Image (tube, rainbow, N blue to C red):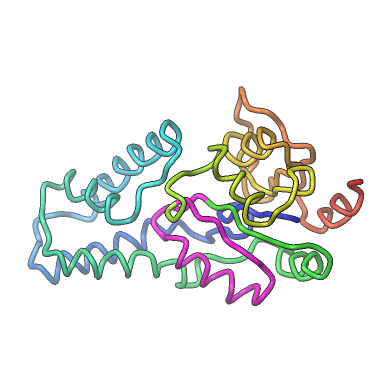
Amino acid sequence: MVTFDFWGTLYRNTVSLKHERKDRIRAAFDRCGITHISDEQIYKAMENSWLLWDDIWRKEQRTLPVAEFLGLVFGELKIQLPEWVIDELCHTLQEAVFTGNTVPTDHIVEVVAELSRSYKLGIISDTGVSSGKYLGRLIERDHPGKFSFGLYSDELGMSKPAPGVFQKVLDINGCKADEVVHVGDLKHTDVLGAKQAGMYSVRYSGVRDDIGEGFPEADWVITDYRDLTEIIRGIR
């Protein structure tokens, strides 16, 4: 079995989604007649909220859903919006992954298609603003029928490297840890979590090369997905 992380592994952004998200927050403000907040203030509130989000992600091993992220942003800006506007904004922010800026990483589509002929494939992803429901739609669009399951932090209530995340893979598939290869881009979540679970680990550095100190290195590091199939077939 081969499992993949989502961000920086299966997908990358051609430009930061923060601009698209700012525009959608601005549109919600305009609808509610909120005109005194500048774009710069929205960007700053989003940046500060992401720092809090990141702190929770790392220390508590869970990811805040989009509604809670927006709550941080609105708290920073000291505003309140009607509940129906917040619900609609939660949807439109998550839909930002379909604007064309979120694209498959180089060669991943053909490599996934090749691997799916011989191995069971799955997703283990920590989610950000977009939940697993939206990420799953993107994966099915680009890799139809190739992935057997998806485990997303917003649905599990915990994020990598929590042992329960990787144990879930073994539980739902009835396999042993040494029968799983996990591919991801981050040492402190993907590599550490896989190694703690006894799985093989591949770190993909084609989008960003994580040089995080104090965390284990993967069994293999690749910059080109065309090397992945040979690595997996060589495991005995």
Q: Position of residue 96 (x, y in %)?
A: 40, 67
Pick the residue in front: 187 or 3: 3
Q: In this image, 169 relative to 129: left or right?
A: right
Position of residue 156 measured from the top left corner of the image (x, y, whole percent) = 46, 51
Q: Which residues are magenta?
A: 126-153
Q: Position of residue 194 (x, y in %)?
A: 67, 40
Count of numbered badges drawn on the protein: 0
Q: Is residue 80 left or right of residue 64?
A: left
Looking at this view, is 146 or 93 the one in front?
146
As displayed, is residue 48 above or below residue 20? above
Instruction: Reply yes or no: does residue 89 show up in magenta.
Output: no
In which quadrant of the rendered view does residue 31 lie?
A: bottom left
In what quadrant of the picture does the N terminus appear?
A: bottom right
Residue farthest top in this picture:
214
Q: Position of residue 141 (x, y in %)?
A: 58, 76
- Residue at the spot 68% in from the left edge and 54% down from the top edge: 3
Q: Is residue 22 left or right of residue 217?
A: left
**Residue visible at 35% across and 43% down in the picture:** 50
Considering depth in this image, is 1 or 184 the residue closer to the camera?
1
**Residue 145 lies in the magenta-colored region:** yes
Residue at image coords 57%, 58%? 12
Direction from residue 200 to residue 83 in the image, left or right: left
